[in-house]
Every structure is written in C-alpha cells, then in structure tokens.
Image: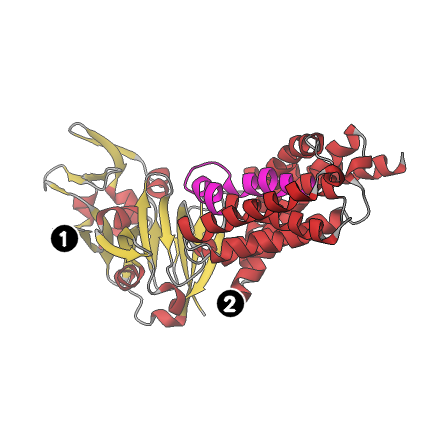
Amino acid sequence: MVRGNVISVVATVLIAIGITSAAYIHFQEEETTAVTAVGAHIYTMEDIFGAGEEKTIGNYTSVALDDVFKMMNLKNPEAYNYTIFSSDGNDKSISWMNATQALLTNDGLVIFSDLGWIKNVTMIKTGNRSLIIFDAFVKFWNETVKIEEENYTGIPLDILVEKIGIKEPAEYTYTFIAVDKYKKTVRWEDARSGIIVWQAETKLKVVLPDLPKAFWVYHLFRLEVKHE
Amino acid sequence: MNKAKLILGMLVFGSIWGLLECTLGDYLHETNLPAGTIMTVVVGLGLMILSRSIYRQRGMQLGMGLIAGGLRYVNPVGGYLLCSVFAIAAEAVVFELIWSLLDINELSLSEKIGMGIITGYGCYTLGYIFTQVATPLFSSVPFYLSDLISILPSILAKGLIAAGLGVIVLPLATSLKTIDIYKIKDRFYYPTTFVVIGVCWLVGTIII
C-alpha cells in the first residue's frame, strides 16, 4: 500500500514537471533577432517575413525591402546607400528611395518597380553593417564538402564567417540554436571545418565533422557569435 | 542463479540492444520520429525490464548497457558516436538506481504503470542530461552550462513522451516473461546464447 502510494506520488510529480516544462516552452516569448558582436544581423526568411509589411509590385506580393533594411537598426536608414549581394555575383547598390519601391520574396528575389530584379539574394550591406539572410545564404551557396563518405552542399562556416565580416574568428564562440531551443556552443577551432547545409528533412543543419554528432544542430534557426 | 548462465544472458540482451541501436537507431535518426525516445524506452527499457523479470538479478542491466554501448562504439557505421554510448550507459545506470529496491515481478498492474512513468521519464531525462555533460568532457570540447540550462525545459517536456511509452512498455515487457530460465536445459541454453551473441557482434561490427 505504502509502496503503491509512493510510486503514484513520484509518477504524478514527474508528469507535473513535464507538463510545466511543456507549458513554459509553449508560452515562452519568441525572440526575433540574432545580433552578432560584429555589427552583422543574421535573420532567417521567417524572421524577415514576420517583421515587415507586405507590398505589391506587378504580380508579386511580399515583404517591403525598406522594412527589411530597417532590421539593421540604423538611426537614419534613409541616409544610406545599400549593396544587395547575390550568390551569382550580380550585386547591386541602391538608395533608400529605390528600396521603398521594391520587395523581397521568400525565394530570395528582390523585385524593383523600376530597376528590374536581383535573384538569389543572400546579404545586404551598408557601411560596416550587414544583414545576412541565413537560409538563403545556405541554400544558394553550393560548396560541397565530403564528410564520412557523404557529400554535404551548403556554405562552409569559414566562408560564412568571412562574409559576416569577422576578422579574427578564433576570438569568438559560435552558438548554434535549433527551433526547439537545442543549443550548442563551440570554439572556432571546432567549428572551422563545419558546413551549414539545407536539407528537406532537417531544414538548416550544421555539420561539424570534428565533433560528436550531438553537436550537429538540426533545424538550425539562429547562429550567435559572441566574443570569448 | 548459475553465474555462467547469467553472464551469457547479460551478453545476449546487451548484444541485441547494441545491434538494435546500430540498425534501428540509425534508421530512426534519419526520420522525423522521436528516435531518442523510442530507442531509450521501447528498446533499451523494454530489454532491461524483460531481462530483469526473467533473471531477477540486480546489476545485470548495467552490464547489458555497457555491452550495448561497446557494440555501438565499435560499430563502423555512423562515425563519432560517443554521445550514443554515453546515453546507453547512463540509461542502464539510472535503471539500476530506480530498481535497486524493487522487484518487478511483485508489482501490481497500477504499480507497474506508475513505475513505467518513473522509469521512462527518469531514464530519458537523466540519460539525456548526462550525455550533454559527458560528451563535451570526453571529447575535449568545452562544456557550456548555459547550453544545458537553455535546453533543460525541452528535455523535461520531451520526457512526457518517454513516460507515456513507459506506461505501455513496462507492463507489456513483464507480461512477455514466459521463459523460465531454470528449466532450460544447458545443452540448449549455451549453444543458443553463443549463436545469438556471435550473430549480433558479427552483424554489428562487420556486416553493417
């Protein structure tokens, strides 16, 4: 009888802990930005589409490009010129005025009302600030790395870090965060040979060949770069 | 209990567990199913409960975990799998701790359901936490406490699925206990166990 009661109480407490944790995760406030220590803002397409207002140009309705620029948190965004980088090398410099008449689609296409379009957009830069469209970067970058007899196509971390503008990568730690908050922090020496890939099943995934698979974060949602 | 029979039983169950980790575990990890929970509760816990109810020997399941972890470690497919080895070993340790004072065969159905929750939840969450701490320590990567704290709610929440599976697996595994180990003749027991162990290690280390 006593044994049965103790078992019931312990089982109930564990269920309560599980339910409380699930509720905590469910009601946790969603963060929307991942700002690195080097003035680069890294977003996923989902972040961008959640933050901007919709605009229509011709047959396309999508997020307004000036709203995307505002995500770089500049004091007077109208005063700057911006360079839009494409993975195929067709980069274009535009003014704020041009941006007010343009939109960004979720397949990485920037459409202007009067300047044509840029496809496979991965990054926007102005001065020493940059906005990385993380998943676009990975999707449109087609570098292949062979790890354990398997080919992974995406963007190698050393290239991503260079594009973000990090000059001394060894001075930073790199935290990979998954959609379910699974989180792994690694040093540059462990991350440098890694690659971020896009796969249908795991979405964004970081592959770190020098580390156990527990460090390979699936459903990657954010990369935080912090000074050690 | 004859010690040789017990050790061979431990090797049989541990080898089957290890082989399933190398085959079914790898397959499940490639799908969207909760691979860790299924392997921990349905396979690991199921085999530990079944062996405990057949052999009624404390400590045997810890040995099974070490054997399964060993087979997982030497399996050539899947690369660097230290984390899986830690998870298997930790699960066996937690099982032994939880069942150190109880006899599975003496429990009522309601007690088995309660213990299914406790064992499923305990093995999954504590095994997961131990793996997160041990893997960095044994692979020369710094351990960041903030990483563990941030995923703790997720681990504790996912333990609910393990607890739910435990409710089914524990009564089911104890009901499968139809073999009376004392009645099996030695001339059947020893060759059969040797064959099962040999096949598991052959398949797990060479063929797969």
Residue A136 at least partly seen: yes
The subunit letter for the residue under badge 2 reads: B
Distance from Cα at disc 1 to Cα at disc 2 = 40 Å
Kind of residue at disc 1: Asp
Kind of residue at disc 2: Pro
Q: Position of residue B11 (x, y in %)?
A: 62, 51
Nearer to us in this view, A131 or B184: B184
Where is A204 relative to A7, above or below?
below
**Residue at the far front in the pictured view:** B187
Does residue A200 appear to the left or right of B132 in the view shown? left
Residue hosting label 1: A91
Where is B151 relative to A128, above or below?
above
The magenta stretch is: B22-49
Q: Position of residue A45 (x, y in %)?
A: 32, 42
Check whether the beta carbons of the residues at disc 1 and disc 2 lie within 8 A of each other: no
Total tally of numbered discs in the picture: 2
Number of residues whose C-alpha sits closer than 10 Å to that of mark 1, classed few (under 14), some (14–19) or many (20 or more): some
**Residues at discs 1 and 2 both on one chain:** no
Membership of A23 in magenta stretch: no
Residue hosting label 2: B142
Number of residues whose C-alpha sits closer than 10 Å to that of mark 2, classed few (under 14), some (14–19) or many (20 or more): some
